[in-house]
Amino acid sequence: MATDKVDPIHQFHLNDLIHVDIGGLDLSFTNSSLFMVIVAVVTAGFLYLTTANRGLVPTRLQSISEMSYEFVASMLRDGAGSQGMRFFPFVFSLFMFILVANLIGMVPYFFTVPSHIIVTFAFSMLVIGTVIVYGFWKHGLHFLNLFVPSGVPGALMPLVVAIEVISFLSRPISLSVRLFANMLAGHITLKVFAGFVVSLGSMGALGIGGAILPLAMTVALTGLEFLVAFLQAYVFAVLTCMYLNDALHPGH
């Protein structure tokens, strides 16, 4: 147990809370599953409680909910136009879930759901899958115009199309790795500096004096991580809006 306190990787371990094995398929309810449920309940509960009895003069919590709504709506209009508002529930749900998951992960001994790439990759595939399904459903084969930019000379068209296809296929990878890597690296760095504070503090007066710098770094990194928690949710939502714009307007 002592090594768990200083091991920066231990915070990302998956632990089975309810082991379920069906035909050799592991469907266990893990600590990650638990915190996904917590994030969903906290997010839905907060939005419901702050908007159930809306007043003409909003309370502070109601203002937060309304600002969140307007923030995502403005982002979606800027990224995908007015037609993009049909995807508002989808984008708003993604943004709020990732944001709350990142913030809850900042609580000591809590699990950071986006720190596992399988989770962020699932979010990314959900976004790209929505783009592909809606694009073909709305535009048919004309959706493939997304890979054929206008104004390109015929001789260069095969190369440009290949680049466009590779760029499109790389989207779920870049989208998932960006969120996963930032949350993983930030929490590891924070845990390392916090570990320095604990280790030096246990060495007596001299160690306590030496722990001042790592303590200051821990405080600074904590503030930075809260900023990163918001920025990563924002970046994920912005890129989602841009990709949905391709489904709505596949022509370049």
Image (tube, rainbow, N blue to C red):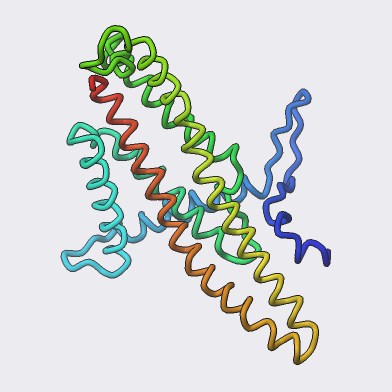
Q: Nearer the viewer, residue 252 or 230?
A: 252
Residue situated furthest bottom in the rendering: 205
Report x, y in % for residue 121. 54, 35
Query: Relative to residue 116, is residue 101 drawn left or right?
Result: left
Residue 81 x %, y %: 19, 35
Establish if 229 lies above or below 133: below
Query: Which residue is pictured at 36% across the width and 25% down the height?
Result: 131
Quarter of image, res 197: bottom right
Please tell me which residue is depicted at 76% across the width and 31% down the height of the picture.
Answer: 21
Query: For the N terminus, which image quadrant?
Result: bottom right
- The residue lying toward the viewer, choosing from 61 and 190, is 190
Residue drawn at point x = 34 percent, y = 31 percent = 243
Please give left or right for residue 184 compared with residue 165 in the image: right
Assign the C terminus to one quadrant of the image. Answer: top left
- Give the total number of marks visible in the rendering: 0
Quarter of the rendering containing residue 118: top right
Which is nearer the eye, 109 or 172? 172
How far across and how far down the image is residue 208, in percent?
71, 87
- Horizontal side of 230 relative to 79 (left or right) equals right
Q: Is residue 25 above or below residue 218?
A: above
